[in-house]
Image: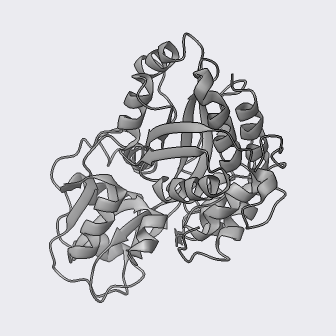
Amino acid sequence: MNFKRHGIMAGIALTATLALTACGSDNNETPSTPGTGGGSTAASDITCAKGSLTAQGSSAQKNAMDEWIKAYQQKCTDAKIDYQGTGSGAGITAFSGGTADFAGSDSALKDGDETTKATARCGGNPALNLPMVTGPIAIAYNLDGVKDLQLKPETLAKIFGGSITKWDDAAIKADNPSATLPSTPINAIHRQESSGTTENFTGYLDKAAAGTWTFGKDKVWKATGGQAEKGSDGVAGAIKKAPGAIGYVEWSFAKVNSLSTAKIFNGAGEYTALTGAAAGKTVAGAKITGTGDDLKLSIDYATKEAGAYPIILVTYEIVCSKGTPADKLDLVKGFLGYTVSAAGQAQLEKLGYAPLPESVQTKVAASVKNLA
Protein backbone atom coordinates (compact mmCIF):
# COMPACT_ATOMS: atom_id res chain seq x y z
CA MET A 1 0.00 0.00 0.00
CA ASN A 2 1.48 3.32 -1.11
CA PHE A 3 0.34 6.40 0.79
CA LYS A 4 1.99 9.09 -1.31
CA ARG A 5 -0.48 11.96 -1.04
CA HIS A 6 -1.07 11.63 2.68
CA GLY A 7 2.63 11.29 3.45
CA ILE A 8 3.47 14.45 1.58
CA MET A 9 0.69 16.39 3.28
CA ALA A 10 1.87 15.17 6.67
CA GLY A 11 5.38 16.34 5.86
CA ILE A 12 4.17 19.73 4.69
CA ALA A 13 2.15 20.13 7.86
CA LEU A 14 5.30 19.55 9.89
CA THR A 15 6.98 22.61 8.46
CA ALA A 16 4.31 24.91 9.89
CA THR A 17 5.54 24.86 13.48
CA LEU A 18 8.57 23.22 15.05
CA ALA A 19 9.14 25.09 18.30
CA LEU A 20 9.56 22.70 21.22
CA THR A 21 6.87 23.14 23.89
CA ALA A 22 5.68 20.91 26.72
CA CYS A 23 2.31 20.01 26.71
CA GLY A 24 -6.94 11.91 31.12
CA SER A 25 -12.40 11.84 30.45
CA ASP A 26 -14.92 9.32 31.26
CA ASN A 27 -14.68 5.69 30.32
CA ASN A 28 -17.71 5.99 28.07
CA GLU A 29 -16.04 8.46 25.74
CA THR A 30 -15.16 7.22 22.27
CA PRO A 31 -11.94 8.16 20.45
CA SER A 32 -12.47 10.28 17.36
CA THR A 33 -11.56 9.10 13.89
CA PRO A 34 -7.82 9.58 13.19
CA GLY A 35 -6.90 12.31 10.78
CA THR A 36 -9.88 14.57 11.45
CA GLY A 37 -8.79 16.72 14.37
CA GLY A 38 -6.75 19.82 15.02
CA GLY A 39 -3.66 20.58 17.07
CA SER A 40 -5.07 20.45 20.58
CA THR A 41 -5.62 17.54 22.94
CA ALA A 42 -9.33 16.90 22.39
CA ALA A 43 -11.19 15.12 25.20
CA SER A 44 -13.01 13.06 22.60
CA ASP A 45 -9.66 11.58 21.54
CA ILE A 46 -8.95 10.18 25.00
CA THR A 47 -10.59 7.16 26.60
CA CYS A 48 -9.45 6.94 30.20
CA ALA A 49 -8.53 3.77 32.03
CA LYS A 50 -7.17 3.15 35.51
CA GLY A 51 -3.88 1.48 36.38
CA SER A 52 -0.21 1.72 35.53
CA LEU A 53 1.99 0.86 32.57
CA THR A 54 5.74 0.46 32.33
CA ALA A 55 7.28 0.75 28.87
CA GLN A 56 10.68 1.34 27.37
CA GLY A 57 12.67 1.29 24.17
CA SER A 58 13.28 3.75 21.35
CA SER A 59 14.91 6.96 22.49
CA ALA A 60 13.93 8.43 19.11
CA GLN A 61 10.32 8.68 20.25
CA LYS A 62 11.06 9.75 23.84
CA ASN A 63 10.10 13.40 23.25
CA ALA A 64 6.81 12.30 21.70
CA MET A 65 6.11 9.83 24.51
CA ASP A 66 6.78 12.47 27.17
CA GLU A 67 4.25 14.78 25.49
CA TRP A 68 1.63 12.05 25.07
CA ILE A 69 2.00 10.77 28.63
CA LYS A 70 1.65 14.25 30.08
CA ALA A 71 -1.50 14.93 28.06
CA TYR A 72 -3.07 11.56 28.87
CA GLN A 73 -2.31 11.71 32.60
CA GLN A 74 -3.62 15.27 32.87
CA LYS A 75 -6.96 14.01 31.63
CA CYS A 76 -6.88 10.56 33.22
CA THR A 77 -5.79 11.12 36.79
CA ASP A 78 -6.07 7.44 37.74
CA ALA A 79 -3.54 6.42 35.09
CA LYS A 80 0.23 6.24 35.55
CA ILE A 81 2.48 5.59 32.56
CA ASP A 82 6.27 5.42 32.67
CA TYR A 83 8.33 5.30 29.47
CA GLN A 84 12.12 5.08 29.50
CA GLY A 85 14.21 5.71 26.37
CA THR A 86 16.60 2.80 26.86
CA GLY A 87 17.02 2.02 23.15
CA SER A 88 15.06 -0.22 20.81
CA GLY A 89 17.02 -3.38 21.56
CA ALA A 90 16.58 -3.01 25.31
CA GLY A 91 12.89 -2.27 24.83
CA ILE A 92 12.30 -5.44 22.81
CA THR A 93 14.22 -7.49 25.38
CA ALA A 94 12.17 -6.00 28.22
CA PHE A 95 8.89 -6.62 26.39
CA SER A 96 9.78 -10.22 25.56
CA GLY A 97 10.93 -10.76 29.15
CA GLY A 98 7.66 -9.44 30.56
CA THR A 99 9.10 -6.38 32.30
CA ALA A 100 7.59 -3.87 29.83
CA ASP A 101 3.89 -3.68 28.97
CA PHE A 102 4.78 -2.46 25.49
CA ALA A 103 8.01 -1.55 23.73
CA GLY A 104 9.04 1.26 21.43
CA SER A 105 11.29 0.20 18.56
CA ASP A 106 12.69 2.03 15.54
CA SER A 107 12.43 -1.18 13.55
CA ALA A 108 9.87 -3.96 13.42
CA LEU A 109 10.51 -7.28 15.15
CA LYS A 110 12.86 -9.44 13.14
CA ASP A 111 11.74 -12.84 11.92
CA GLY A 112 13.31 -15.56 14.01
CA ASP A 113 14.46 -15.11 17.60
CA GLU A 114 12.89 -11.67 18.24
CA THR A 115 9.50 -12.70 16.90
CA THR A 116 9.62 -16.10 18.60
CA LYS A 117 10.35 -14.62 22.03
CA ALA A 118 7.74 -11.88 21.64
CA THR A 119 5.13 -14.45 20.60
CA ALA A 120 5.96 -16.58 23.63
CA ARG A 121 5.56 -13.55 25.89
CA CYS A 122 2.10 -13.02 24.36
CA GLY A 123 1.03 -16.55 25.28
CA GLY A 124 1.53 -17.88 21.78
CA ASN A 125 -0.34 -14.99 20.16
CA PRO A 126 1.32 -12.69 17.60
CA ALA A 127 3.07 -9.55 18.79
CA LEU A 128 2.11 -6.56 16.65
CA ASN A 129 4.30 -3.86 15.12
CA LEU A 130 2.21 -0.68 15.21
CA PRO A 131 3.82 2.37 13.50
CA MET A 132 3.32 5.45 15.65
CA VAL A 133 6.03 8.08 15.04
CA THR A 134 7.78 9.20 11.86
CA GLY A 135 11.25 10.49 12.72
CA PRO A 136 13.61 11.86 10.07
CA ILE A 137 17.25 11.04 10.86
CA ALA A 138 19.48 14.09 10.66
CA ILE A 139 23.17 14.03 9.82
CA ALA A 140 24.17 16.63 12.39
CA TYR A 141 27.59 18.25 12.51
CA ASN A 142 29.66 20.83 14.39
CA LEU A 143 32.04 22.64 12.04
CA ASP A 144 32.69 26.35 12.48
CA GLY A 145 32.34 28.40 9.33
CA VAL A 146 30.70 25.65 7.28
CA LYS A 147 27.06 26.08 6.46
CA ASP A 148 24.89 24.00 4.14
CA LEU A 149 27.19 20.98 4.21
CA GLN A 150 26.13 18.45 1.61
CA LEU A 151 27.10 14.81 1.40
CA LYS A 152 26.65 11.90 -0.96
CA PRO A 153 25.84 8.50 0.57
CA GLU A 154 29.24 7.12 -0.45
CA THR A 155 30.95 9.99 1.36
CA LEU A 156 28.83 9.34 4.45
CA ALA A 157 29.75 5.67 4.30
CA LYS A 158 33.45 6.50 4.21
CA ILE A 159 33.15 9.01 7.08
CA PHE A 160 31.32 6.58 9.38
CA GLY A 161 33.33 3.61 8.11
CA GLY A 162 36.56 5.35 9.12
CA SER A 163 38.29 5.80 5.76
CA ILE A 164 37.71 9.57 5.67
CA THR A 165 39.25 11.16 8.75
CA LYS A 166 39.62 14.90 8.00
CA TRP A 167 37.11 17.51 6.91
CA ASP A 168 39.19 18.67 3.95
CA ASP A 169 39.23 15.19 2.40
CA ALA A 170 38.92 15.22 -1.38
CA ALA A 171 35.57 13.41 -1.32
CA ILE A 172 34.00 16.00 0.99
CA LYS A 173 35.49 18.79 -1.13
CA ALA A 174 33.93 17.24 -4.23
CA ASP A 175 30.52 17.26 -2.53
CA ASN A 176 31.04 20.88 -1.41
CA PRO A 177 32.93 22.72 -4.19
CA SER A 178 32.01 26.17 -2.87
CA ALA A 179 32.86 25.54 0.77
CA THR A 180 36.10 26.29 2.61
CA LEU A 181 36.76 23.13 4.58
CA PRO A 182 39.24 23.01 7.47
CA SER A 183 41.73 20.22 8.07
CA THR A 184 40.01 19.49 11.40
CA PRO A 185 39.91 15.78 12.33
CA ILE A 186 36.48 14.18 11.98
CA ASN A 187 34.92 12.80 15.14
CA ALA A 188 32.20 10.43 13.90
CA ILE A 189 29.72 9.73 16.70
CA HIS A 190 27.47 6.68 16.80
CA ARG A 191 25.10 4.98 19.22
CA GLN A 192 26.64 2.86 21.95
CA GLU A 193 23.73 0.51 22.61
CA SER A 194 21.53 -1.60 20.36
CA SER A 195 19.43 0.93 18.52
CA GLY A 196 16.73 1.02 15.88
CA THR A 197 18.12 4.37 14.79
CA THR A 198 21.41 2.65 14.03
CA GLU A 199 19.55 -0.07 12.14
CA ASN A 200 17.72 2.48 9.99
CA PHE A 201 20.87 4.54 9.35
CA THR A 202 22.98 1.51 8.45
CA GLY A 203 20.08 0.21 6.39
CA TYR A 204 20.16 3.45 4.43
CA LEU A 205 23.93 3.20 3.89
CA ASP A 206 23.62 -0.46 2.92
CA LYS A 207 21.14 0.45 0.17
CA ALA A 208 22.29 3.89 -0.96
CA ALA A 209 26.07 3.28 -0.65
CA ALA A 210 26.18 -0.38 -1.58
CA GLY A 211 29.76 -1.49 -2.16
CA THR A 212 31.18 1.38 -0.09
CA TRP A 213 29.46 0.57 3.19
CA THR A 214 30.63 -2.93 4.11
CA PHE A 215 29.18 -3.31 7.61
CA GLY A 216 25.62 -4.26 6.68
CA LYS A 217 22.38 -3.29 8.39
CA ASP A 218 22.23 -3.88 12.12
CA LYS A 219 20.94 -2.47 15.41
CA VAL A 220 24.48 -2.78 16.80
CA TRP A 221 27.21 -0.50 15.41
CA LYS A 222 29.74 -2.69 13.58
CA ALA A 223 32.22 -0.18 12.10
CA THR A 224 35.46 0.44 13.99
CA GLY A 225 36.58 3.78 15.34
CA GLY A 226 34.47 6.79 16.09
CA GLN A 227 32.94 7.74 19.41
CA ALA A 228 30.07 5.83 21.04
CA GLU A 229 27.38 7.63 23.03
CA LYS A 230 24.30 6.29 24.80
CA GLY A 231 20.90 7.34 23.52
CA SER A 232 19.84 10.00 21.06
CA ASP A 233 20.32 12.70 23.66
CA GLY A 234 23.87 11.47 24.28
CA VAL A 235 24.74 11.59 20.57
CA ALA A 236 23.25 15.05 20.11
CA GLY A 237 24.95 16.40 23.23
CA ALA A 238 28.33 15.02 22.15
CA ILE A 239 28.05 16.61 18.70
CA LYS A 240 27.19 19.96 20.25
CA LYS A 241 30.23 19.86 22.54
CA ALA A 242 32.88 18.66 20.08
CA PRO A 243 34.14 20.81 17.16
CA GLY A 244 34.65 18.56 14.14
CA ALA A 245 31.96 16.11 15.24
CA ILE A 246 29.36 14.50 13.01
CA GLY A 247 26.67 11.98 13.91
CA TYR A 248 23.28 10.56 13.05
CA VAL A 249 20.40 11.53 15.31
CA GLU A 250 16.66 12.02 15.06
CA TRP A 251 15.67 15.46 13.79
CA SER A 252 13.84 16.33 17.00
CA PHE A 253 17.09 15.97 18.99
CA ALA A 254 19.05 17.96 16.40
CA LYS A 255 16.50 20.77 16.66
CA VAL A 256 16.43 20.80 20.45
CA ASN A 257 20.23 21.14 20.47
CA SER A 258 20.31 23.72 17.61
CA LEU A 259 22.62 21.50 15.54
CA SER A 260 23.49 22.11 11.90
CA THR A 261 22.24 19.36 9.58
CA ALA A 262 23.62 18.28 6.23
CA LYS A 263 21.89 18.08 2.88
CA ILE A 264 21.85 14.51 1.56
CA PHE A 265 22.18 13.41 -2.07
CA ASN A 266 19.11 11.35 -2.96
CA GLY A 267 18.17 8.82 -5.63
CA ALA A 268 16.81 11.60 -7.84
CA GLY A 269 20.33 13.04 -8.10
CA GLU A 270 19.97 16.14 -5.93
CA TYR A 271 21.16 17.35 -2.54
CA THR A 272 18.11 17.73 -0.31
CA ALA A 273 17.82 19.56 3.00
CA LEU A 274 15.95 17.93 5.86
CA THR A 275 12.48 19.47 6.01
CA GLY A 276 9.09 18.08 6.92
CA ALA A 277 7.99 18.13 3.30
CA ALA A 278 11.17 16.37 2.11
CA ALA A 279 10.85 13.62 4.75
CA GLY A 280 7.17 13.27 3.93
CA LYS A 281 8.01 12.40 0.33
CA THR A 282 10.01 9.39 1.51
CA VAL A 283 7.32 8.34 3.99
CA ALA A 284 4.87 8.52 1.08
CA GLY A 285 6.66 5.67 -0.67
CA ALA A 286 6.52 3.27 2.28
CA LYS A 287 4.41 0.13 1.96
CA ILE A 288 2.69 -2.01 4.57
CA THR A 289 4.24 -5.48 4.48
CA GLY A 290 2.68 -6.89 7.65
CA THR A 291 -0.54 -8.89 7.58
CA GLY A 292 -3.79 -8.43 9.47
CA ASP A 293 -3.35 -6.16 12.47
CA ASP A 294 0.45 -6.22 12.10
CA LEU A 295 1.47 -3.04 10.27
CA LYS A 296 5.16 -3.47 9.54
CA LEU A 297 6.36 -1.00 6.88
CA SER A 298 8.98 -1.18 4.14
CA ILE A 299 10.83 2.10 3.47
CA ASP A 300 12.53 2.84 0.15
CA TYR A 301 15.83 4.44 1.19
CA ALA A 302 16.85 4.77 -2.47
CA THR A 303 13.71 6.65 -3.45
CA LYS A 304 13.98 8.55 -6.73
CA GLU A 305 11.22 10.95 -5.72
CA ALA A 306 12.36 14.51 -6.49
CA GLY A 307 12.88 16.57 -3.34
CA ALA A 308 12.81 13.55 -1.00
CA TYR A 309 15.03 13.40 2.08
CA PRO A 310 15.91 9.69 2.18
CA ILE A 311 17.06 8.96 5.76
CA ILE A 312 14.01 8.38 7.92
CA LEU A 313 12.75 5.92 10.48
CA VAL A 314 9.33 4.89 11.70
CA THR A 315 9.00 4.00 15.36
CA TYR A 316 6.71 1.12 16.27
CA GLU A 317 4.90 0.31 19.47
CA ILE A 318 5.24 -3.45 19.99
CA VAL A 319 2.33 -4.97 21.86
CA CYS A 320 0.53 -8.30 22.19
CA SER A 321 -2.39 -8.84 19.83
CA LYS A 322 -3.84 -11.00 22.62
CA GLY A 323 -2.49 -11.94 26.01
CA THR A 324 -2.05 -8.55 27.68
CA PRO A 325 -2.98 -8.97 31.38
CA ALA A 326 -6.55 -7.94 32.16
CA ASP A 327 -5.46 -5.23 34.58
CA LYS A 328 -3.31 -3.62 31.85
CA LEU A 329 -5.38 -4.09 28.70
CA ASP A 330 -7.79 -1.16 28.99
CA LEU A 331 -4.97 1.28 29.72
CA VAL A 332 -2.82 -0.03 26.85
CA LYS A 333 -5.79 0.41 24.49
CA GLY A 334 -6.72 3.80 25.92
CA PHE A 335 -3.23 5.25 25.78
CA LEU A 336 -2.24 3.89 22.35
CA GLY A 337 -5.67 4.85 21.05
CA TYR A 338 -4.88 8.42 22.05
CA THR A 339 -1.35 8.43 20.60
CA VAL A 340 -2.65 7.46 17.15
CA SER A 341 -5.68 9.74 17.31
CA ALA A 342 -5.95 13.03 15.44
CA ALA A 343 -5.11 15.02 18.57
CA GLY A 344 -2.26 12.71 19.56
CA GLN A 345 -0.61 12.80 16.15
CA ALA A 346 -1.05 16.57 15.98
CA GLN A 347 1.25 16.90 19.00
CA LEU A 348 4.13 15.59 16.87
CA GLU A 349 4.24 18.58 14.56
CA LYS A 350 5.85 20.85 17.14
CA LEU A 351 8.44 18.30 18.28
CA GLY A 352 10.36 17.66 15.08
CA TYR A 353 8.43 14.56 14.01
CA ALA A 354 5.97 13.98 11.17
CA PRO A 355 2.43 12.68 11.75
CA LEU A 356 1.52 9.35 10.21
CA PRO A 357 -0.40 9.50 6.94
CA GLU A 358 -4.14 9.42 7.60
CA SER A 359 -4.56 6.03 5.92
CA VAL A 360 -2.03 4.47 8.31
CA GLN A 361 -3.50 6.23 11.34
CA THR A 362 -6.83 4.60 10.56
CA LYS A 363 -5.28 1.14 10.30
CA VAL A 364 -3.30 1.54 13.54
CA ALA A 365 -6.44 2.74 15.37
CA ALA A 366 -8.28 -0.36 14.19
CA SER A 367 -5.45 -2.64 15.36
CA VAL A 368 -5.42 -0.99 18.79
CA LYS A 369 -9.18 -1.44 19.06
CA ASN A 370 -8.76 -5.18 18.37
CA LEU A 371 -6.22 -5.74 21.17
CA ALA A 372 -7.41 -8.40 23.62
Give the residue displayed 62% in from the left and 60% down from the top: 354
Residue sticking out furthest to the top: 124
Lateral position of residue 147 relative to residue 7, left or right? left
Could you tell me residue 24's position as x and y percent?
67, 52
Q: Is residue 169 visible?
A: yes
Q: Viewer-proximal residue, 276 or 307?
A: 276
Give the residue displayed 53% in from the left and 53% down from the top: 65
The C terminus: image quadrant: top right
Determine which quarter of the picture holds residue 43. bottom right
The N terminus: image quadrant: top right
What is the image's colouring?
one colour
Lateral position of residue 346 relative to residue 248, left or right? right
Residue sticking out furthest to the front: 78
Q: Viewer-proximal residue, 174 or 41?
A: 41
Q: Viewer-proximal residue, 146 or 32?
A: 32
Could you tell me residue 145's position as x and y percent?
30, 89
Instruction: Check the image and report above or below for 151 versus 363.
Output: below
Give the residue displayed 64% in from the left and 74% down from the top: 15
Could you tell me residue 7's position as x and y percent?
71, 56
Q: Viewer-proximal residue, 228 or 305?
A: 228
Give the residue displayed 62% in from the left and 58% down from the top: 74
Lateral position of residue 154 relative to residue 369, left or right? left
Could you tell me residue 118's position as x and y percent?
48, 20
